[in-house]
């Protein structure tokens, strides 16, 4: 696993009328895409392979506070990029917000972040997103299928999910 | 001076008729008495909204009352009161639109919409749909059109509306989404496609199939094509 995955809102990373060529919209940095807590940013380890990225999507979609099905956007960052740019990260399974136990070990936090470091990370993410090389969108239907499959295989319990999400999963 | 009351029934086959309340006796005097009988327009007992005003219209107030006997009104009176009703409804709609817009702006500014998580504006919009029922679409379309050049606001509005059940947004939701598909901002178009994905059905599928041919942004085009496959299954 030599990549790190982050959930983003893809549309916020496209250039707009007022952005320069490689510029990044402020909303992409100040919104949920790069929201930090304690100067740390949550990421998930995975391979550069859609099947494995789906495991990260499952981890995110099965967060204990997840309320509804939605399409999910993921961008991958090459793990080697972090040390090369003086960005520290550590394995933090205890911080993994997922109900799928076997995915907790994939969780890492990029720590001691500053604005300068966030901009470095954002620049790399924008490059990857715009080149489409390490960007994945899972549609709502695909996210539903991942959750249903996890329920069927016993990796997840329906009762642990939020009521609204349970209803959405039962509705089809 | 008598008070003049314009009545607008709440029924769909409604009619308005002006009548007067005598200041002393408080008896009702119908303006249309002796005119054409239009009983077919009058449900037996309805709950009506009215404007109460003095004759020169300087003091007016909204209120409601129920009554059970509409016996006669002339076509001329009916036509005049229809104009009055339209003005009243336009005024009420405009007021409600401004109020809703005032509430939506801070909600969208304070909390970004995040995939998989409810947003407080969703509940507000849902309540508006329940409260205003048939005019909710006009209300929300009005807000949408007024803010068409504010892509961040439009995106949030579409994301919230797109999360409502399709039967609550028919047909205005689809109109809003189709209009958004030609917006210059990718974010707005993305929100519109997400709404179609959530609503599903053959109408959404039809719109997506047409739009897939037009979209030029590759990742959005791929998304549309995947949603078409998902909805076709």
Image (cartoon, rainbow, N blue to C red):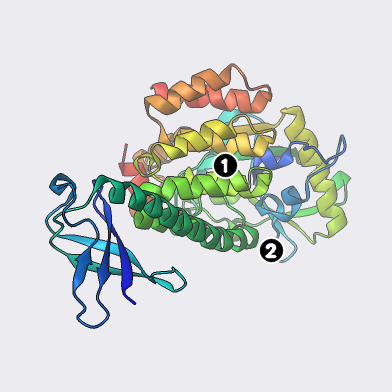
Q: Nearer the viewer, residue B208 or B170?
A: B170
B123 left or right of B79? right
Q: Which mark is residue A56?
A: 1
Give the percent coordinates (x, y) of residue A166. 35, 49
* Residue that sits furthest to the bottom in the current view: B24
Q: Nearer the viewer, residue A153 or A115?
A: A115
Give the percent coordinates (x, y) of residue A46. 64, 38
Give the percent coordinates (x, y) of residue B112. 62, 55
Query: Closer to the N terminus: mark 2 or mark 1?
Result: 2
Residue B71 falls in which quadrant of the image? bottom left
Q: Secondary structure at mark 2?
A: loop
Q: Chain of mark 1?
A: A
Number of callouts in the render? 2
Give the percent coordinates (x, y) of residue A96. 57, 56
Please name the residue shown 55% across and 36% down the image.
B192
Quadrant assignment for the N terminus of chain A: top right
Do marks 2 and 1 share a chain? Answer: yes
Quadrant assignment for the C terminus of chain A: top left
Seen in the picture, residue B119 relative to A84 is either above or below; the reply is below
Measured Cα–Cα span from mark 2 to mark 1: 20 Å
B143 left or right of A88? left
Residue B171 falls in which quadrant of the image? top left
Please name the residue shown 65% across and 53% down the image.
A32
Crowding at dot 1, Cα within 10 Å, few <14 / some 14-19 / many 20+, comes out as many
Q: Which mark is residue A153?
A: none
- The residue singled out by tag 2 in the image is A37
């Amino acid at each position: 696993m030599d990549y790190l995955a982050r959930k983003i809102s893809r549309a916020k990373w496209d250039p707009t009328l007022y952005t320069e060529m490689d510029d990044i919209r402020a909303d992409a940095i100040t919104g949920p895409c790069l929201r930090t807590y304690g100067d740390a940013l949550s990421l998930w380890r995975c391979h550069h392979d859609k099947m494995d990225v789906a495991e990260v999507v499952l981890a995110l979609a099965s967060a204990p506070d997840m309320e509804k099905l939605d399409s999910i956007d993921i961008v991958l960052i090459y793990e080697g990029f972090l040390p090369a740019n003086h960005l520290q990260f550590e394995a933090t399974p205890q911080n993994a917000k997922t109900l799928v136990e076997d995915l907790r070990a994939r969780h890492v936090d990029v720590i001691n972040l500053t604005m300068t470091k966030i901009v470095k990370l954002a620049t790399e993410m924008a490059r990857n997103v715009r080149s489409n090389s390490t960007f994945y969108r899972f549609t709502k239907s695909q996210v539903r299928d991942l959750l249903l499959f996890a329920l069927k295989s016993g990796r997840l319990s329906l009762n642990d999910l939020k009521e609204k999400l349970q209803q959405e999963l039962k509705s089809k | 001076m008598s008070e003049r009351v314009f009545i607008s029934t709440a029924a769909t086959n409604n009619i308005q008729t002006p009548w007067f309340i005598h200041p002393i006796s408080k008896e009702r005097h119908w303006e249309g008495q002796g005119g054409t009988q239009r009983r077919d327009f009058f449900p037996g007992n309805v709950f009506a909204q009215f404007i109460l005003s003095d004759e020169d219209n300087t003091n007016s107030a909204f209120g409601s009352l129920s009554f059970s006997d509409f016996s006669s009104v002339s076509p001329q009176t009916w036509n005049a009161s229809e104009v009055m009703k339209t003005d009243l409804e336009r005024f009420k709609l405009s007021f409600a639109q401004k109020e809703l817009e005032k509430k939506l702006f801070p909600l969208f500014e304070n909390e970004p919409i995040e995939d998989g998580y409810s947003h407080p504006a969703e509940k507000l919009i849902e309540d508006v749909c329940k409260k205003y029922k048939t005019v909710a679409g006009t209300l929300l379309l009005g807000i949408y059109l007024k803010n068409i050049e504010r892509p961040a606001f439009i995106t949030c509005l579409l994301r919230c509306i797109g999360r409502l059940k399709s039967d609550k947004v028919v047909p205005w939701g689809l109109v809003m989404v189709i209009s958004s598909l030609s917006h210059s901002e990718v974010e707005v178009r993305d929100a519109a496609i997400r709404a179609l994905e959530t609503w599903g059905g053959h109408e959404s599928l039809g719109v997506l199939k047409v739009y897939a041919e037009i979209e030029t942004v590759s990742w959005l085009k791929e998304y549309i094509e995947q949603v078409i496959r998902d909805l076709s299954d």
